[in-house]
Image (spheres, rainbow, N blue to C red):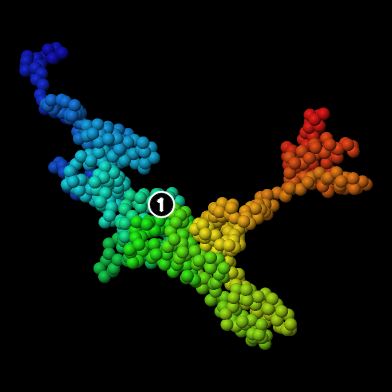
Amino acid sequence: MGEAIGMSTEELFNDEDLDYTPTSAALVNKQPVAIDSKETEVATYLIDIGLLDKSNDSTDGEPEEKRRKIANVVINQSANDSKVLIDNIPDSSPLIEEVRHGAGTGLREILKAHGKSGGKMGDSTLEEVVAPVRETCAQTLGVVLKHMNETGVHKTVDVLLKLLTQEQWEVRHGGLLGIKYALAVRQNSSSWLIPILPDMLRHIFQFCVLESSQEILDLIHKVWMELLSKASVQYVVAAACPWMGAWLCLMMQPSHLPIDLNMLLEVKARAKEKTGGKVRQGQSQSKEVLQEYIAGADTIMEDPATRDFVVMRARMMAAKLLGALCCCICDPGVNVVTQEIKPAESLGQLLLFHLNSKSALQRISVALVICEWAALQKECRAVTLAVQPRLLDILSEHLYYDEIAVPFTRMQNECKQLISSLADAHIEVGNRVNNNVFTIDQANDLVTAVFNEVTSSFDLNPQVLQQLDSKRQQVQMTVTETNQEWQVLQLRVHTFAACAVVSLQQLPEKLNPIIKPLMETIKKEENTLVQNYAAQCIAKLLQQCTTRTPCPNSKIIKNLCSSLCVDPYLTPSVTCPVPTQSGQENSKGSNSEKDGMHHTVTKHRGIITLYRHQKAAFAITSRRGPTPKAVKAQIADLPAGGSGNILVELDEVNSFFL
């Protein structure tokens, strides 16, 4: 074609252009690959801490796409069983999650095989983890750390600790995973546990008190039990005894009051500084300190029933943690006879101190701890002898607890104001009531019987009577509220005290003070956690009373069955839909009226299956005539699908027997 247009082709190609000389240089193939924001943030962080060099040709702005470099590397070395040749290794990890996961898994398996680090890391849990890629990479790092020297391990852990200071939770999560597998493979670092044991126990218990999620509470309990099993008993007792009183106070925290931040570890980390942009000169930054509540501040706005449920759940889980800790404190190895002050005796005195208080929460919390401790450890005479008599005394006490001090004081003031208002209307009631301190029963008597009696005996102005009645209603509302709060506290104190006595397996001669609160809780308690706790205690009580004479088990079971069937909406009443044979003989002339009275099977009353069976049995056994016919009105009231077929089914039953 060149010749056709007059072009000279002699110098277009020469012989050197056709020669191919291969070179040993690497062939570079650059491919553009998309990168997400998370990769950018991690790369930026690595540049900041000096682990990644910034390229010289980088621009001020972040490029839209980053490229990876793939090189064909030729390694001139002899191959043997302990060396691996890896070709086409990318200098940066692929960005597809599946590819990264596969690469991490491959590296882990290669390092396991050639590093002779037995199969401690595996894929068995990757289906349940939050981030499989980070988990796999952390396992790979753990395999490498197993063969590093101590200096290298410390430097690696320092980098992982820096990751924990980042704002992105993914970065912090990766750092935690790396530390997790570093500790898993470096068993010679177990001595690290001793110095951090007190703070670790404080952190775990603090999380338990502040947590509202059942799943996390279960995990906290698992970690706590694992920690107590791994650490030496002597170290656990030395680390826990100074904080036992503070932990009990956290467990007893009222649900409506914020926790004192001085009782929490690292309170300053919970403070958040709120600034609206740049702070102008002369303005100070406003600092808001988060208030913490038992069972979490996020549940403080829930309805009373839900809030009571999560708070009681947090108290019960805290009791489990302290109960397991009490087993360590009561261990015979740390309670030597030669000791002047034994840890078990100190524990008994601490529990007894709270049982002697007038706070219902203190009594409930200590009783829960005793129950959980006794469930794990059957014998500890030092604690049992200290608390068991006091628990029996609590079962017979009736006092106004500190928790109702505010409504009780308001009730006193309003009752005195009502008496003053009656005195202004020339009605004296001072000789009929106690003017000093009103009990709840006396206050209730004042606003009901006494008020009605004194006002009816005087001819009062209707306007004055209306004002007095308005004040009476206000006082009555206060009395009702105070009484309800007291009843709940009283029942729970007696219930958990009874549970503690049953758990200690030292029942008194008279069981009525123990059985009564447990049965009342089954009937009246609205919190299902407390109700289930009492039910489990009743089961333990029945087991302990099997050899007792006289045995109360039959009476307890009978009362439980009666309570179970007391609600007709849940347990329908079983009435005989067919009159007895003697009743039929006595009815004579009023058979139709009697049948209509007895054959009551409707949508809301009676049992249709029982009705059918008894009608069929009556038709077979009766020799006094045909089967009585059901009243039409009752048949019409039966549920759909069952009323029209009753007579047909009866005929089928009769033909079957014939």
Residue sitting at x 39%, y 40%: 128
Image quarter of the N terminus: top left
For residue 210, which quarter of the picture? bottom left
For residue 333, which quarter of the picture? bottom left
Pinpoint residue 405: horizontal percent, then vertical percent. 51, 73
Vertical placement of residue 477 versus 658, above or below: below
Pinpoint residue 263: horizontal percent, then vertical percent. 36, 65
Vertical placement of residue 634 versus 556, above or below: above
Vertical placement of residue 575 versus 352, above or below: above
For residue 434, which quarter of the picture? bottom right
**Furthest-right residue in this view:** 589
Image quarter of the C terminus: top right
Residue sitting at x 25%, y 52%: 192
Work out whether residue 216 can be spotted: no
411 displayed left or right of 155: right
Q: Amino acid at mark 1?
A: His
Q: Crowding near pointer 1: few (<14 within 10 Å), some, many (20+)?
A: some
577 displayed left or right of 249: right
Check disc 1 and report the residue beneath it.
221
Question: Which secondary structure lies at badge 1?
Answer: helix
582 displayed left or right of 394: right
**Furthest-top residue in this view:** 4
Work out whether residue 105 can be spotted: yes
